[in-house]
Amino acid sequence: TCLYCFRTTELCLCSSFARFEIEPLIVLLVHPKEFLRTVGTARIVRCSLTNSKMIRGNGPQLDCDPTFLSLIHDSSLRPMILYPGSDSLNLSTSDDAELTSAIPNDGKRLCVFVIDGTWSLAKNMIRTSKVLRQLPKLSFDVKRASVYEFRRQPKEFCLSTVEAVSLLIDQFVAREICTVDPENTHHEMLKAFNSMVKAQVKFNPGA
């Protein structure tokens, strides 16, 4: 097993990772049930986005996690969570005034928490974490279905973690929240993801 991407050496993805950075801090909140899944996609993000962070835990565990809480209470950060809803700031449709109100240019670094888990696990993490429930939400319109062939999505707008992060960065760039260094390298994450999907389907057609 490759100790970097956690996949067997035969299906190792490391050669397909392209490293990049963005100014907003992306923090992956990985549910324990997802952490050791070799077909999970949070690790693609973590291995590609070099200044991202990963924290393991469910809702109650996060509320006691010192690393998580230190990010929440860091006065230099503006914590938000990527999660859809009527109370979410939609980056695809919000006007400039709404965007500036939610993410003012006050010198604070945007810190976006992204839940890695099934849709039901994600909802449960929000429900059981007092801290997560209180965070302002970000979202965007999803215009294409996930290509995660061997994991069924409950709704058309549901995406894998790597797809969601890549599209989130697209929105950040379009709204001039950040740039990508090197430019457009975040799209390489999807190439690695597609390679994983194709290899998994070929390796185990019934997956």
Image (spheres, grey):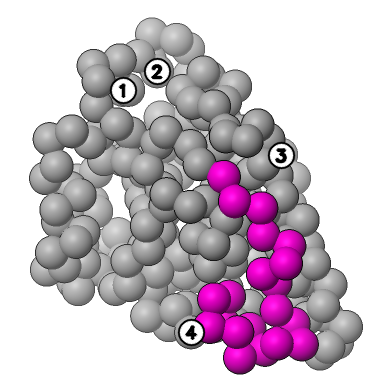
On residue 143, which mark appears?
A: 3
Q: Nearer the viewer, mark 2 or mark 4?
A: 4
Q: In the displayed structure, does residue 56 sit left or right of residue 22?
A: left
The CA distance from mark 2 to mark 1 is 5 Å
Labels 4 and 3: the sequence-earlier one: 4
Labels 3 and 2: the sequence-earlier one: 2
Label 1 sits on residue? 102
The residue located at (71%, 50%) in the rendering is 188
Q: Nearer the viewer, mark 4 or mark 3?
A: 4
Q: Quadrant of the N terminus?
A: bottom right
The CA distance from mark 1 to mark 3 is 24 Å
Q: Position of residue 86 (x, y in %)?
A: 40, 36
Q: Are marks 2 and 1 in contact (CB under 8 Å)?
A: yes
The residue located at (64%, 65%) in the rendering is 153
Asked if residue 155 is positioned above or below residue 26 in the image, the reply reads: below
On residue 36, which mark appears?
A: 4
Badge 1 element: helix
Foreground residue, 123 or 165? 165
Q: Nearer the viewer, mark 1 or mark 3?
A: 1
Labels 2 and 4: the sequence-earlier one: 4
On residue 140, which mark appears?
A: none
Badge 2 element: helix
Main SS, magenta region, reads loop
Q: Are marks 3 and 2 in contact (CB under 8 Å)?
A: no
Looking at the rendering, the stretch of residues picked out in magenta corresponds to 1-20
Label 2 sits on residue? 99
Residue 18 lies within the magenta run: yes
Q: In the displayed structure, does residue 104 sit left or right of residue 162?
A: left
| Label 4, residues with CA under 10 Å away: few <14, some 14-19, many ≥20 | few
